[in-house]
């Protein structure tokens, strides 16, 4: 219900052109400077992924990102991998940001432990923010110059598009916009624009405008309604029935009513049913494996190991085992699948020994979201970006993603480990 409602809202919102407009805005703010652009684009991707789901953001932001890279002669495959990494990290912040978060926070046993929207964000925010800024610093330090070294495939693609001759001359409105931009002087302490900034920005603005402002306002009303209900649900005795799934589904129905289209099939046709069916199938598979007794068998043997430790160390060891096991499994298996299996495993361990559940939830979500950066198969958003890139002529192989993503995953996992140990072992924030 949570993912279906959110996908309905965001997929309708994508038809207004607002996401392409926001990406072009990062070019405008950065004044055409490559690394400021990559920074603003990464942060925009992370923010949108947090509140509108990383998988959907990967779908709508990738095409315009590819065009930006071509306009600025940046290595497209590398920028797309960076965008994928920040989509996974930003999605870790909220229950709707990544499928693993939705799987954890909508589980009845997790809800019974008092985990709600506000509590989830508060627990995840410090680790996510530190990880994002550290990762960007590493990305800048390690690829400050190589980002401008284009591979032969991109050079060939750019040459093909140049020789195709299908580029239309700028319209009169675009020429007037170029003249207007050239008259503007940058602030004294702000970035100086690059040489072709006015022409490039005017060309991007011409094809990436907000196409339906009334519909965009209706989408914002639905999203604000959902967000307010989630926050109210976090307050004791206020809006007790406003669970994440119901609220998001009601917000989607509200938007469909406000949109007032005669053909409901057209609205349902733009929803990403493949992602929903994939996650639904994982629930069925997980339940079948649970009925076979796999989780009970693993839990019994894990508890034998934990009971041999001192009681004050059991929570820390359990958290670290769950965190790193989830992340390492995510390299080879999608993080949504790993989350379903490891969540049942967490319940099994808690039932066998006196270990608090909340630290396990945070370890699981950090491991699933940060571990999704370790390989191309780690998250659905990674695969979506690779697929769209391939449609535009850019191939992101498993090895190419792994070389960039795995070291960054290790860095974020160390940050997540330190944060969890300080918060839940040293400070006992359970």
Image: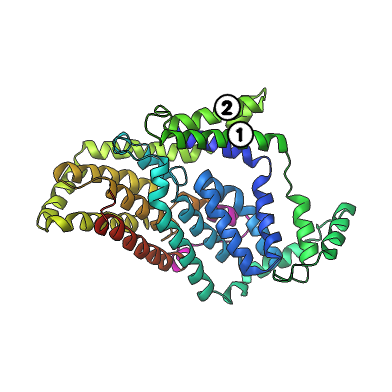
Res 403 visible: yes
Whether the magenta-drawn stretch holds residue 399 is answered as yes
Q: Residue at x 74, y 62 (%)?
A: 161
Q: Residue at x 90, y 53 (%)?
A: 172
Of label 1 and label 2, which has the lower sequence position? Answer: 1
Image quadrant occupied by the N terminus: top left
SS assignment for the magenta stretch, majority: helix
As displayed, is residue 73 above or below residue 219?
below
As displayed, is residue 392 above or below residue 239?
below
Which mark's residue is nearer the viewer, 1 or 2?
A: 1
Question: Which residues fall within the magenta stretch?
Answer: 386-403
Question: Can you identify the residue that label 2 sits on?
Answer: 254
Element type at marker 1? helix
Res 74 visible: no
Whether the magenta-drawn stretch holds residue 83 is answered as no
Q: Are marks 1 and 2 in contact (CB under 8 Å)?
A: yes
Could you tell me how far apart the alpha carbons at marks 1 and 2 are, in whole angstroms? 9 Å
As displayed, is residue 316 above or below residue 191?
above
Observer-nearest of 227 and 211 = 227
Observer-nearest of 119 and 335 = 119
Element type at marker 2? helix
Question: Can you identify the residue that label 1 sits on?
Answer: 221
Looking at the picture, how far across and down is residue 230, in whole percent? 46, 36
């Amino acid at each position: 219900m949570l993912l279906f409602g959110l996908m309905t809202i965001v997929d309708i919102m994508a038809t207004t052109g607002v996401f392409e407009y926001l990406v072009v805005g990062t070019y405008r703010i950065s004044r055409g400077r490559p690394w400021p652009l990559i920074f603003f684009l990464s942060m925009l991707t992370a923010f949108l992924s947090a509140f509108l789901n990383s998988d959907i953001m990967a779908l709508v932001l990738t095409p315009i990102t590819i065009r930006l890279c071509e306009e600025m002669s940046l290595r497209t495959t590398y920028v797309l991998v960076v965008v994928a990494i920040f989509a996974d990290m930003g999605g870790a912040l909220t229950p709707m940001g990544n499928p693993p978060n939705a799987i954890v926070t909508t589980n009845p046993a997790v809800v019974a432990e008092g985990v709600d929207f506000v509590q989830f964000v508060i627990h995840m925010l410090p680790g996510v923010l530190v990880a994002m800024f550290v990762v960007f610093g590493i990305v800048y330090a390690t690829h400050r110059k190589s980002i401008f070294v284009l591979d032969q495939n991109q050079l060939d693609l750019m040459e093909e598009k140049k020789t195709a001759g299908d580029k239309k001359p700028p319209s009169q409105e675009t020429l007037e916009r170029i003249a207007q931009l050239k008259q503007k002087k940058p602030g004294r302490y702000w970035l100086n624009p690059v040489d072709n900034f006015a022409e490039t920005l005017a060309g991007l603005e011409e094809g990436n405008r907000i196409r339906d402002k009334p519909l965009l306002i209706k989408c914002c009303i639905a999203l604000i309604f959902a967000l307010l209900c989630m926050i109210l649900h976090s307050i004791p005795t206020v809006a007790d029935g406003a669970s994440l799934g119901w609220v998001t589904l009601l917000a989607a129905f509200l938007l469909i009513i406000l949109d007032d289209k005669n053909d409901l099939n057209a609205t349902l046709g733009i929803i990403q049913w493949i992602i929903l069916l994939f996650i639904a199938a994982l629930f069925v598979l997980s339940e079948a494996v649970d009925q076979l007794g796999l989780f009970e068998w693993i839990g019994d043997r894990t508890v034998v190991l934990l009971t041999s430790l001192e009681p004050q160390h059991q929570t820390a060891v359990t958290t670290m085992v769950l965190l790193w096991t989830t992340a390492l499994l995510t390299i080879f298996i999608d993080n949504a699948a790993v989350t379903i299996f490891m969540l049942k495993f967490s319940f099994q361990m808690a039932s066998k020994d006196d270990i608090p559940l909340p630290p396990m939830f945070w370890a699981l979500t950090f491991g699933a979201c940060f571990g999704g950066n370790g390989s191309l198969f780690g998250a659905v958003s990674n695969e979506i970006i690779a697929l769209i890139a391939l449609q535009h002529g850019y191939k992101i192989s498993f090895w190419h993603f792994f070389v960039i993503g795995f070291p960054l995953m290790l860095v974020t996992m160390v940050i997540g480990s330190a944060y969890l140990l300080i918060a839940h072992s040293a400070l006992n924030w359970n």
